[in-house]
Image: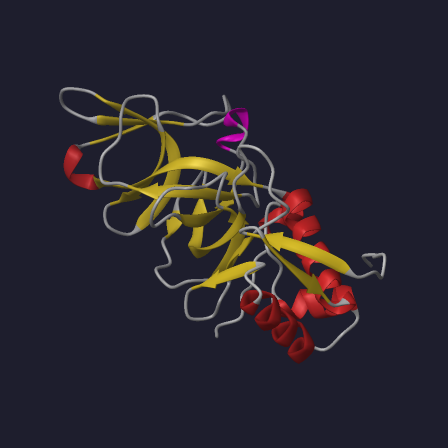
């Protein structure tokens, strides 16, 4: 449970001072702390549990903060949230963004690629700033020496090409997907694991389609995502 000091706060935005109520300040402190510690904005349901209030109350308080220009929400459901802290020199607004988890992908023996979303995960947009990013769930240990472990979410930048040595998500024969290190040769493509227990596999060009370049990894409780469809 998060603990807060209950106090009035005068908040300055664009040179204009405005006062936040105790409850508004509590929500602002909570969101700031979650972004600083975890790099993500919680779901409304999780915020309600942490703050000990109703889901509706959290939504109303966020609406009030938005009207006071303390935060801004983007997208239909408002799950991309930008916080505007006390101004600091050369500082940027904190921001969370929601990425889709598009299915489970195997690092090791490839498994059938699922096309539907499994859910979403909210990440710090300053860490993952690219356009149209998506996440894939890893199963297996074939990439462990590259720091990618069973159960991790890999964040991918959509691409249909790759440079030699890049870690990419590829579709094999239109059905199976895997994450491997990519190498292109004159007459074939080589997919290399990052684990000596697994073998290098070669494919003709016609059997592989690059789906994206891996640009980051989300591990542990940060890899938990909101699987609810809204």
- Magenta span of residues: 142-146
- Place residue 44 in its image quadrant: bottom right
Query: What residue is rendered at 58% in x and 59% in y?
Result: 70
Q: Position of residue 192 (x, y in %)?
A: 37, 25
Tell me: residue 124, above or below residue 215.
Answer: below
Q: Position of residue 211 (x, y in %)?
A: 29, 44
In the rendered view, how is the structure colored? Answer: secondary structure
Tell me: residue 189, above or below residue 137.
Answer: above
Query: What residue is rendered at 62% in x and 76% in y?
Result: 60
Q: Position of residue 173 (x, y in %)?
A: 23, 46
- Place residue 64 in its image quadrant: bottom right
Front in this rendered view, residue 188 or 74: 74
Front in this rendered view, residue 13 or 92: 13
Q: Position of residue 157 (x, y in %)?
A: 35, 41
Tell me: residue 168, above or below residue 100.
Answer: above
Front in this rendered view, residue 130 or 145: 130
Query: What residue is rendered at 70% in x and 66% in y?
Result: 24
Query: Which secondary structure class fits the magenta region best?
Result: helix
Q: In the shown orientation, is residue 86 left or right of residue 3?
A: left
Front in this rendered view, residue 29 or 48: 29
Residue 98 magenta: no
Residue 145 magenta: yes
- Place residue 57 in its image quadrant: bottom right
**How many numbered tags mark residues here?**
0
Q: In the shown orientation, is residue 171 left or right of residue 220?
A: left
Query: What residue is rendered at 53% in x and 24% in y?
Result: 145
């Amino acid at each position: 449970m998060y603990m807060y000091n209950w106090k009035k706060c005068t908040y300055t935005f664009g040179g204009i001072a405005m006062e936040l109520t105790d409850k508004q300040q509590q929500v602002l402190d909570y969101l700031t702390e979650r972004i600083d510690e975890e790099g993500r904005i919680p779901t409304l349901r999780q915020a309600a549990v942490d703050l000990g209030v109703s889901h509706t109350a959290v939504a109303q308080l966020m609406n009030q903060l938005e009207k006071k220009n303390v935060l801004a929400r983007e997208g239909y459901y408002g799950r991309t949230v930008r916080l505007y802290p006390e101004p600091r020199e050369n500082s940027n607004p904190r921001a969370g963004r929601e990425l889709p988890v598009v299915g489970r992908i195997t690092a090791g023996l490839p498994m059938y690629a699922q096309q539907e979303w499994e859910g979403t995960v909210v990440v710090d947009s300053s860490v993952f700033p690219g356009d149209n990013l998506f996440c894939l769930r890893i199963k297996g240990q074939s990439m462990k020496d590259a720091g990618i472990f069973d159960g991790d979410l890999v964040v991918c930048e959509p691409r249909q090409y790759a440079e030699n040595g890049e870690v990419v998500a590829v579709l094999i024969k239109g059905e199976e997907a895997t994450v491997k290190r990519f190498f292109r040769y004159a007459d074939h493509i080589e997919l290399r694991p990052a684990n000596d227990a697994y073998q290098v596999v070669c494919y003709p060009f016609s059997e592989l389609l690059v789906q994206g370049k891996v640009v980051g990894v989300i591990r542990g409780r940060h890899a938990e995502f909101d699987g609810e469809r809204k």
